[in-house]
Amino acid sequence: MEIIIQSPHFIINDKLKEFTQAKAEKLLKYDSRILKCEITLKLDKSDTDNNKECEIIINQRRSQFFASRRCSTFEEAINESVRAMIKQLKKKTAKKWNSAEKFTGINAETEIE
């Protein structure tokens, strides 16, 4: 999986970059067919505390997923975005297993255990 971390108009430190990379690599646990993961960290110029935003775009062979969260710290925004992405990946996997069950008659729960 190719991981691209972008931060337009500011430079992120190595610690935040490593944190982001580690969180992105955890997404492979939920779907091994991920080809590319683009993470964009943005700093909003608003007066509120929730001015740090994380956007994640995942590209697969035939599909694309998107999650975006805005929080008070980048770490929190990254965690929330990754949670939202995991939820989408789990939903896609469950949908795939349910459709396979309809056509093959194989129950997904018995096959996984």
Image (cartoon, helix red, strand yellow):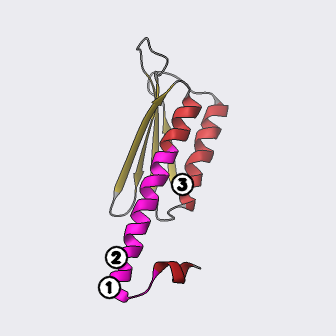
Which residue lies at the image location 49% right of the left edge and 53% below the top edge? 86
Report if the CB atoms under discs 2 and 3 are less than 8 Å apart: no
What SS does tag 1 mark? Answer: helix
Type of amino acid at the residue the image marks with label 1: Phe
Disc with the residue nearer the chain's start (2 vs 3): 3
Tell me the distance, in whole angstroms, between the alpha carbons under discs 2 and 1. Answer: 7 Å
- SS of the residue at dot 2? helix
* Dots 2, 1 in contact, CB < 8 A: yes
Residue under the image location 42 percent in, 68 percent down:
94
What span is colored magenta in the figure?
82-107
Residue 96 drawn at (x, y percent): 38, 71
- The kind of residue on which mark 3 rests is Leu
Q: Residues within 10 Å of mark 3 (few under 14, many from 20)?
A: some
- Which residue is disc 2 drawn over? 99
| Circle count | 3
Q: Give the Cα separation between the discs numbered 2 and 3.
A: 23 Å
Which residue is at the far right? Answer: 15
Residue at 60% from the left image edge and 36% from the top image edge: 17
Judging depth in this view, the residue of 104 and 32 nearest the camera is 104
Q: Earlier in the sequence, mark 3 or mark 1?
A: 3
Q: Is residue 69 magenta?
A: no
x%, y% of residue 37? 46, 49
Instruction: Identify the disc placed on residue 27.
Output: 3
Q: State yes or no: residue 83 in magenta.
A: yes
How far is mark 3 from mark 1, CA to CA?
Answer: 28 Å
Position of residue 113 relative to residue 61, above or below, is: below
Q: Which mark is residue 28?
A: none
Numbered label attached to residue 103: 1
